[in-house]
Image: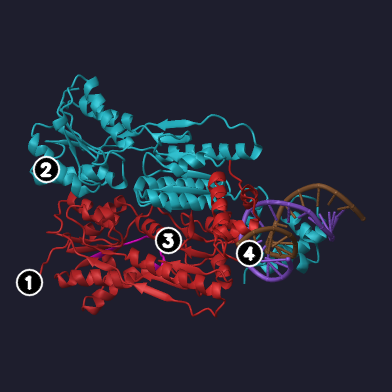
Chain colours: A cyan, B red, C purple, D brown
Amino acid sequence: MNGVTIKDVAADAGVSTATVSHVINPTRYVSDGVSKRVQNSIDKLNYYPNMLVGSLKGKGTYTIGMIIPSITNETFGKMAELIQTTLFDLGYNLIVCNTSFDTELEERALNTFLMKKVDAVIAVPANSRCEKLEEIAKTNTPVILVDRILKDVDTDTVVTDNYKGQYELTSYLIRMGHKNIGYVDRLIEQSHSSDQRKGYLAALSDNGIEPDPENIINANGHYYKAGMEAGHALMQKRPLLTAIACYYDPIAFGVMRGLTDLGYRIPDDVSVVGYDNMLFAEATWPALTTAEVPVKLIAEEACRILKLRLEENGSKNDKTNTIHTTFPPALVIRESVKRIIDQ
Amino acid sequence: MNGVTIKDVAADAGVSTATVSHVINPTRYVSDGVSKRVQNSIDKLNYYPNMLVGSLKGKGTYTIGMIIPSITNETFGKMAELIQTTLFDLGYNLIVCNTSFDTELEERALNTFLMKKVDAVIAVPANSRCEKLEEIAKTNTPVILVDRILKDVDTDTVVTDNYKGQYELTSYLIRMGHKNIGYVDRLIEQSHSSDQRKGYLAALSDNGIEPDPENIINANGHYYKAGMEAGHALMQKRPLLTAIACYYDPIAFGVMRGLTDLGYRIPDDVSVVGYDNMLFAEATWPALTTAEVPVKLIAEEACRILKLRLEENGSKNDKTNTIHTTFPPALVIRESVKRIIDQ
DNA sequence: ATGAAAGCGCTAACAG
DNA sequence: CTGTTAGCGCTTTCAT
């Protein structure tokens, strides 16, 4: 039976609740004998101090709220896990809410965070706007945006530089001698995806290659099948392409499969690169060259900032300016790109 | 600025805190005019009622604690996500703690659950024993075990029948004409893995095939590379095998890769089956025949039981007996098995 | 070296 | 129809 309170312990040990409190914390001297008696009662009764009460006394809840589109997504999942374990070490628990890109759900989740008095919010928002997050940001509850930025909100942000990631990947293709480089883009326009495409375009321009809109196609989904279709369609209308960059590993995998079905050999006839370095990218055939979102760095930085904000709130100092950290993805070179130029 | 309390609202609206409370909940009649005034103040001040206080008044925290080895694991991640979203609809939040199979971490997580007064615990325990969980199970905090069972604890359980899953998979191979069937097992002995191997062995015996211990090999890890090595080793010592069953999809993928390197064609020379139906199983070449853990059913059943227990606790009725549900995995037939017998 | 009691935010029983 | 107040579990002054 739970519901053992400090009173029960105090009664059992024959002391006041104050003394029990001081034994637990320990916030003032308690004689050895009394201390032991109290400990015994605690153990005997299976007493677990109610942390929620502390929040009534201005101590914070030691709970952080996190919204995320889906922990099932490999990148997001890793972030959530890393953040959770790091925060746990700092004495905080994480309430995670999956939003599946549903704005309404997102808002409801944030509302419960507010009612549960979370000490901070970590968000991978569904869209580029979120009123509730704007509202919370004005509050003294810290908000930290991860992997996605938000319009009209001034909060700390920790993001990937997808422009640079795709720029590097495309530049790599060019260094390997490719000039006719296709790009499979996502259908829905989001800030970070357009950054990625811009990186592809800029790399071409910067290397004296005129970008051709016809070399870009939109995949109809985020799954490998969409990649197969896109690969088919793109190669059929642009047979001279020697390389295809894709916004996402599963799409790249689909493109490889699709082109193989069409009789192309990868990478001998067509080189392919993905994006995200998902677990299976190492296991495709040929193994996929891609760019890796530095999830671990992002999670660590988010926690570092969080800790900072939490400490600031505790000491009632002036808030320092918002922090914006950007991490470039790392090029992961494997076997899906062929060098078609002499060294 | 947060920290707006019911008092602030009451003062702003010129009413008592009781009235504000009754407007929010709504638990007694409040005249239209007053009600509107209060609502206005609430909106104006951005008041969010403190849910944590309710728990002091015996209302529960509407928070559920979940321990899980790693949400990064595809199956566990799906479970956590499905459980979280379902519980959210029921008005509950989920505190997730990743234990990475660390018993000590698991215990600490459970301790904080107790101090945060979670209304229930959902656990995918790291091992077959967990004292803290035993302790909690004796309490009136419901404990629901998912995907793993625990010795010496009488709690509700929702698990997969891995014996049956592997039995079905192996029987399928036999129906397709295979008699020399290898098995790649995991290294570490855990209850559910031995079930799986037993299913393999039983399917052989029940079909008049004498199990041969030499046909079984232990993979040195859970990643595809371990599968490659195991595949090599197994085929080298048992060249007559026509099929290999693996305890886990990534291992099966590794076996396919490894055997392909050795010059075998899959499934023409050797058939391969995996286990878990991970996302990439559809995308391997050939697409992997495997068994799917019915994650959705498991999550739904876990939530159904949870709801039941929560309601019971509320109504102080007698606890009904513990519920033990088992779901069989579903056979997912794709292209990695060849029929070598006439219909 | 320890106890008594106020008070955190809110609800519900009691008053009017 | 609405207000007053005790009390949930705990911490923390203030007393002793």
Mark 3 belongs to which amino acid? Asp
Does the rendering let one see residue B173?
A: yes
Picture quarter containing residue A148?
top left
Letter of the chain that mark 3 sits on in the rendering: B
- Magenta residues span B182-192
Subunit ID for the residue under disc 2: A
Question: Gap in Å between the C-alphas at discs 1 and 4?
Answer: 71 Å
Find out whether the residues at labels 1 and 3 contact each other: C-beta distance under 8 Å.
no
Q: Which mark is residue B89?
A: 3
Which secondary structure lies at badge 3? helix
Q: Residues within 10 Å of mark 3 (few under 14, many from 20)?
A: few
**Residue under label 1:** B342
Q: Earlier in the sequence, mark 1 or mark 4?
A: 4
Disc 2 is placed on an element classified as helix
Real-space Cα separation, disc 2 to disc 4, in angstroms: 63 Å
Residue B3, given in percent of the width and then of the height, sits at 61, 46
Name the one closer to the observer, A173 or B19. B19
**Residue type at tag 1:** Asp
